[in-house]
Image (spheres, rainbow, N blue to C red):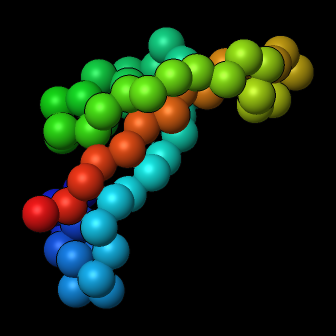
Amino acid sequence: MSELERIARRERKTVLVLDTATGSGAEQFYARCGWEKVGEIPRYALMPDGEMTATSLFYKFLP
């Protein structure tokens, strides 16, 4: 993540946005990296088993 943020700063980006499956381990990972969760969209993504799942939206401002 630090390399991604370094490249984004070099490109003069000020905010990053991402989404990940709600309830996944990635949610905790992004929170530990300083990303802020701002909400969820239900039935957003199709999982390999054919079920729809929610996605969680995150952002992070860069210094």
Point out the residue furthest to the left here.
63
Q: Nearer the viewer, residue 2 or 48?
A: 2
Q: Is residue 20 visible?
A: yes
31 on left or right of 51? left
The answer to whether 20 is drawn above or below residue 13 in the figure is above
- Give the residue displayed 29% in from the left and 67% down from the top: 14
Position of residue 43 measured from the top left corner of the image (x, y, whole percent): 79, 19
Q: Position of residue 7 (x, y in %)?
A: 26, 79
Q: Residue at x 31, y 86 (%)?
A: 11
> Between 19 and 61, which is closer to the camera in this rendering?
61
Horizontal side of 18 relative to 10 (left or right) equals: right
- The x, y position of residue 48, in whole percent, is 78, 28
Image quadrant where residue 3 sits: bottom left
Using the rendered image of the protein, determine whether residue 7 is visible from the camera's viewpoint. Answer: no
Q: Residue at x 38, y 57 (%)?
A: 16
Which residue shows up at 67% across the image and 23% down it? Answer: 41
Specify whether 39 is left or right of 59.
right
**Seen from this angle, which residue lies furthest bottom?**
11
Q: Quadrant of the N terminus?
A: bottom left
Q: Is residue 12 left or right of residue 54?
A: left
Looking at the rendering, which quadrant does residue 34 occupy?
top left
For the C terminus, the quadrant is bottom left
Q: Give x and y (percent) for residue 22.
A: 54, 19
- Figure disc tally: 0
